[in-house]
Image (cartoon, rainbow, N blue to C red):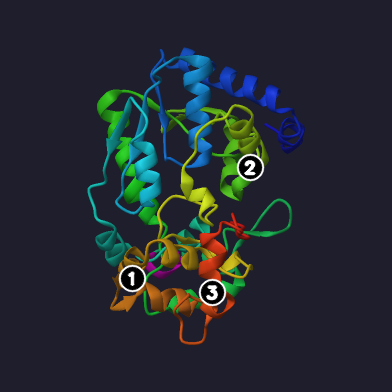
C-alpha cells in the first residue's frame, strides 16, 4: 500500500467509508471461513465497528471485551448493555504488571525503546536505541527521542508491556481457544506504528502471526462522530463527562502532549477519585506511579505546585462545558 492511497481514501465520504468497512469485513470473513469477532473496547471507535458489523454484515455478530479491571466504570456498564459480548480477563493484575515490567510513559514505541535500552544484553540493540540507525530517508530510526534519553537511568522501569499483558495476551488466548480472529477498530492516523502497519498489510492482515482485520483504518475521528450522530448510535456517556479517550484509566501514553487547562488525570480524579488514588500508589522499584509521572514533568491535579481547582474545573466538567481536551499521541 502507498501513503498516497491512504490520503485519497481518508478523503472519501462517510457512505464510501461505510461501504469500504463492510467490504473489508466480508473479505476477511471469506478468507477465514467466517471466523471473525469484533474486538470491543466499549470506546466510540469499536462501538461504531460493532454497529457496522451487526447492522450491515450479520445480526448478533460476536464481540469480545477484555475487562482488565482498569476501564472506566462507565465503559464497563455500557458494554454490559450489549448482547452477545464475551467478557475475558487477563491473568495478571495491573499492580503486578507495573511492578514487574514498568510504567507506561510517553508512547508505546518510546517505552519499548527505553525498556530495551535499559535491559538488553545486546550492545548492538542498545546502541541503536540510544543513537539510532541510518534509514533510507536519511533520518535516524529506532532511536529514543533525545528528550527522553534521561529515562534510561530513571529509578524505575519504563515499559509498553502493560498493553501486552492486559489486552493482547487475553485476546490471543481467546483466539487460540476458539479459532476466531479479531476485527479491530483502530485507525491508521492514530499513530506512526499503526500507519506503518497499514502501509505494510492494508486493512486485512493474513500474516500467520497476525491474522486480523482493521476495517476503520481509513476513517478519522470526525467520521466516527458523524456515523454516531447520523445513525443515532448509542455511545458510552464517558465522552460527555470531559473525557475523549477511553481504555485503561491510568494510561500514561501521550499524557505529556496534553496542553489544555487540564489533562486526563484531572478528569480521572474528578470522576473517580478513589481509582485515581489507587493508580497513583502503584509502585515499581519502590517508586510510585505518581512520582514517575511527575518525574517526566506531568502536572497532576494534586501536585504540590499546582492548584487547578482554583480555575473551577469541577464546575466545568459537571456542566459538560468541556467535552474534550487537547490530546495527541506520539
Give the Cα distance between marks 3 and 2.
Answer: 32 Å
Looking at this view, name the residue that lies furthest to the left: 91
Magenta range = 114-120
Image quadrant for the N terminus? Answer: top right
State if disc 3 and disc 1 touch (CB < 8 Å): no
Q: Position of residue 65 (x, y in %)?
A: 35, 37
Q: In which quarter of the image is residue 187?
A: top right
Residue 54, relative to residue 220: is it above or below? above
Q: What's the magenta bit mostly, secondary-structure-wise? A: helix
Verify whether residue 238 appears in magenta. Answer: no
Verify whether residue 119 appears in magenta. Answer: yes
Say which of marks 3 and 2 sits in front: 2
Disc 3 packing (10 Å; few <14; some 14–19; many ≥20): some
Q: Where is residue 6 in the image (x, y as percent from the top left)?
A: 71, 35
State if disc 1 and disc 2 touch (CB < 8 Å): no
Residue drawn at 37 percent across, 30 percent down: 82
Per the image, the residue denoted by label 2 is 221
Q: Earlier in the sequence, mark 1 or mark 3?
A: 3
Per the image, the residue denoted by label 1 is 277
Give the Cα distance between marks 2 and 1.
Answer: 31 Å
Amino acid at each position: 500500500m502507498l501513503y498516497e492511497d491512504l490520503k485519497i481514501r481518508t478523503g472519501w465520504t462517510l457512505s464510501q467509508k461505510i461501504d469500504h468497512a463492510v467490504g473489508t469485513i466480508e473479505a476477511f470473513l471469506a478468507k477465514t471461513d467466517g471466523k471473525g469477532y469484533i474486538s470491543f473496547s466499549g470506546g466510540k471507535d469499536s462501538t461504531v465497528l460493532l454497529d457496522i458489523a451487526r447492522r450491515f454484515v450479520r445480526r448478533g455478530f460476536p464481540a469480545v471485551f477484555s475487562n482488565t479491571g482498569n476501564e472506566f466504570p462507565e465503559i464497563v456498564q455500557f458494554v454490559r448493555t450489549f448482547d452477545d459480548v464475551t467478557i475475558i480477563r487477563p491473568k495478571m493484575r495491573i499492580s503486578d504488571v507495573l511492578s514487574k515490567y514498568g510504567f507506561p510513559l510517553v508512547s508505546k514505541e518510546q517505552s519499548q525503546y527505553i525498556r530495551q535500552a535499559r535491559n538488553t544484553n545486546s550492545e548492538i540493540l542498545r546502541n541503536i536505541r540510544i543513537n539510532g540507525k541510518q534509514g533510507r530517508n536519511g533520518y535516524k530510526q529506532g532511536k529514543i527521542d533525545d528528550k527522553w534519553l534521561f529515562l534510561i537511568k530513571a529509578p524505575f522501569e519504563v515499559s509498553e508491556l502493560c498493553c501486552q499483558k492486559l489486552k493482547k495476551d487475553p485476546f490471543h488466548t481467546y483466539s487460540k481457544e476458539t479459532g476466531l480472529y479479531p476485527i479491530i477498530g483502530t485507525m491508521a492516523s492514530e499513530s506512526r506504528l499503526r500507519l506503518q502497519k497499514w502501509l505494510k498489510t492494508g486493512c486485512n492482515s493474513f500474516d500467520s502471526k497476525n491474522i486480523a482485520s482493521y476495517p476503520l483504518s481509513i476513517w478519522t475521528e470526525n467520521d466516527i462522530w458523524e456515523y454516531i450522530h447520523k445513525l443515532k448510535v448509542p455511545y458510552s456517556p464517558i465522552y460527555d463527562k470531559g473525557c475523549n479517550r477511553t481504555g485503561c484509566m491510568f494510561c500514561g501514553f501521550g499524557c505529556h502532549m496534553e496542553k489544555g487547562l487540564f489533562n486526563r488525570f484531572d478528569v480521572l480524579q474528578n470522576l473517580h477519585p478513589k481509582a485515581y488514588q489507587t493508580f497513583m500508589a502503584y509502585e515499581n522499584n519502590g517508586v510510585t506511579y505518581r512520582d514517575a509521572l511527575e518525574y517526566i514533568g506531568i502536572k497532576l491535579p494534586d501536585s504540590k505546585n499546582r492548584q487547578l481547582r482554583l480555575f473551577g474545573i469541577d464546575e466545568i466538567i459537571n456542566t459538560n462545558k468541556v467535552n474534550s481536551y487537547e490530546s495527541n499521541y506520539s
